[in-house]
Image (cartoon, rainbow, N blue to C red):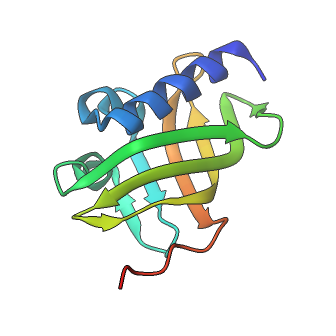
Amino acid sequence: MTSDVTQWLTAWAAAERAGDAARLDGLLHEEFRGVGPFGFVLDREQWLRRFEDGLRFSAFDFTPDFEVRKVAGTAIAVGTQQQTGSYQGRPSDGAFRVTLVLTGGPQWRLLAAHLSLRTPPAPPAS
């Protein structure tokens, strides 16, 4: 993997883990769309607002599962996102297969993120 994409992925994961919407603001493309593991789609502003709406991470890591591919100013990273956290007080722990589409290298911006469940969600607490 090239070092510029590796550095970007590290910065992105750190911003997500910290709930740092201001830092994420500089990492997302103006036309960003994120598809969540249950099919919902968030635009850029909605993605940035997740932390204000109650998203909290105590752990968040992204590990590329395949070589990052670069084609004509675009980079595609497919990997596993492991997270421990909550959304509005409900657990949001899990492992997700994630596809990230970056554009504008070497000043990469995230154009799209697509998450799918890699492991089933934890059952609700009784």
Q: Position of residue 24 (x, y in %)?
A: 35, 33
Considering only vertical position in the picture, is 40 above or below 81? below
Q: Which residue is drawn at the image coordinates 30% and 38% (left, top)?
A: 19
Q: Position of residue 60 (x, y in %)?
A: 48, 41
Foreground pick, 107 / 3: 3
Q: Which residue is drawn at the image coordinates 66% and 34% (left, top)?
A: 74
Extreme residue toward the right, this view: 67
Extreme residue toward the front, this view: 126
Considering only vertical position in the picture, is 120 above or below 8? below
Q: Position of residue 49 (x, y in %)?
A: 22, 50
Q: Quadrant of the N terminus?
A: top right
Foreground pick, 117 / 83: 83
Extreme residue toward the left, this view: 52
Q: Which residue is drawn at the image coordinates 67% and 49% (left, top)?
A: 80
Foreground pick, 47 / 102: 47
Q: Is residue 61 left or right of residue 26?
A: right
Q: Is residue 97 left or right of residue 9?
A: right
**Where, by quadrant of the figure, is residue 100 drawn?**
top right
Q: Quadrant of the C terminus?
A: bottom left
Extreme residue toward the bottom, this view: 126
**Where, by quadrant of the figure, is residue 72 drawn?**
top right
Q: Is residue 109 left or right of residue 56?
A: right
Q: Which residue is drawn at the image coordinates 40% and 46% (left, top)?
A: 31
Q: Position of residue 75 (x, y in %)?
A: 68, 34
Q: How many marks?
A: 0
